[in-house]
Image (spheres, rainbow, N blue to C red):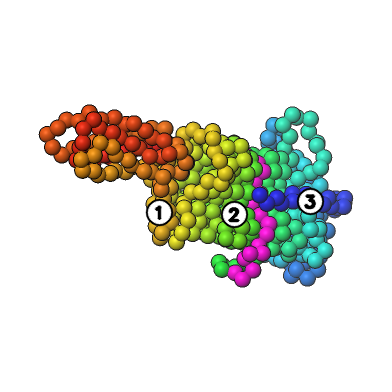
Amino acid sequence: MLKSSIASRRPSPVSIPSSPPRQTVHRHHGRAVSRVYEVSAYGADPTGTEDSTEALLKVFADVLRGPTSGTMLHGMIKNFGGAQINLAGGIYLISRPLRFPVGGVGNVVIFGGSLRASDDFPTDGYLINLSTSSRWSSTAKKYDYEYITLRDLMLDSNFRGGGVFIRDSARISIDNCYITHFTTDGISINGGLDNLVRNTFIGQHITNGSDVHERHFSGTGIALNSGDNAITNVVIFSAAVGINITRQANFLSGVHCYNKGHKYGGVGIYLNLSGRAQTHIVNSYLDFTGIVAEDPVQLTVANSFFLEAFIVFKSKIGVAKWVTVVNNMFSGLRGKMVVLDGKFEDIDNVLVDGNEVGGGMGLKATVARGSTKGRGKTSWVVDFNRVLLFPRRITHAHYTLTSIGSEFPRHALRNVTRNRVVVESDIPVTGTVYATVRQ
């Protein structure tokens, strides 16, 4: 398992300017109805030539001087009414992470431009950091931020740290962003809940597939150390691990991972959960890099496409329960669609069925059907080892013996050990045994 740093360097104290907020205010009948902070008015350089860190941090601080409209989550988060930090299509060079000076901020939008790390940006930092070291609330369940939207941004970490860091926050939305050149994580979400990453492109190196440097890709596209989140319509095109999930109860849909081929040790989606997955992966595309699930429990993988990719169940404590892998398409020249890494002993309600396999890849399932013919036989054996996922395990078996002739033989299922169904009759029979089994 690859581990990525989630630490970030604390910036120096930010001084809040004494002048009134520099903002665009639209008025209706004399009342201010919106606030848009134009970063160039604070001296930020939209050409990316001069360092804009101090100017942008002043914008972040100035937002907190504006009016609020009550509170949000548990009365802890101040509602800043949708205040907007507008990058106005500029490219801004920064040497320290951008963060609000205090927590308790909600309903703010940052949008419309590019941020690039300078050559002296801290290697353990993130371009945008939504976390605070201070615990400003006495409430038992603490959140730092709520409903912060990062939209239409290009974040270039310049191989100096990561893109976005979020901690103990709720309903953060990362929408239509392009995050690249990170060395730790493109996005790191830690604690909190109900965060969304959607319509976003993430890649350590900018490439469109085969790359001569692919074996050296490192870092993680999305480090998800949080539950109750959704990752939808996201492309991860280069990183050692596409999505690394270390907490349960997350939903992934429309994810396309071609970050690093499995032959170089890459993983598309890594479920590092050991017995508590509760993860739903649907309508996704794993491209030369697959899914690794440690001791999966309550995991669904459905309606997805695997091109030269497969699913690995990795045993640490030997558990696989309530797992569903159905209605997927697998295409590859070799290997098996589902692979066991280690020994599983605690198995219950694992369903691998209804998948399509092509190109020479081997089918694996927990439900199988087979038959065998015989002439003048008293014993029939249907061997399911080629198909069944778990070795030496058949929990349910059903068979039918059809015979040719006038005799009515007595017959019985005698054995299901070693993934083989053995049927015997009391007299020689010419006929066929049809068997259906489940693990």
Q: Residue 421 carries which label?
A: none
**Amino acid type of the residue that numbered disc 1 sits on in the rendered structure:** Val
Q: Which of marks 2 and 1 is nearer the N terminus?
A: 2
Q: Which of marks 3 and 1 is nearer the N terminus?
A: 3
**Amino acid type of the residue that numbered disc 3 sits on in the rendered structure:** Ser
| Quarter occupied by the C terminus | top left
**Amino acid type of the residue that numbered disc 2 sits on in the rendered structure:** Val
x and y percent of residue 385 in the render? 41, 45
* 93 is higher (above) or lower (below) than 139: below
Residue at position x 57%, y 60% in the image: 263
Is residue 302 shown to the viewer in this render?
A: yes
The image shows a total of numbered marks equal to 3
Residue on which disc 3 sits: 8
Q: Compute the Cα span from label 3 to label 1.
A: 44 Å
Residue on which disc 2 sits: 267
Q: Residues within 10 Å of mark 2 (few under 14, many from 20)?
A: many
Specify start and end residues of the magenta stretch as a single range: 211-227
- Quarter of the image for residue 36 reads bottom right
Secondary structure under tag 1 reads strand
Q: In this view, does 296 lie to the left or right of 352?
A: right
Q: Compute the Cα span from label 2 to label 1.
A: 21 Å
Tell me, yes or no, whether the highlighted magenta stretch contains residue 315: no
Q: Which of marks 3 and 2 is nearer the N terminus?
A: 3
- Quarter of the image for residue 115 reads bottom right
Residue at position x 77%, y 42% in the image: 103
Q: Residue 357 carries which label?
A: 1
Q: In this view, does 298 lie to the left or right of 160?
A: left
x and y percent of residue 51 in the render? 81, 65
Q: In this view, does 264 lie to the left or right of 61?
A: left
Closer mark to the observer between disc 3 and disc 1: 1
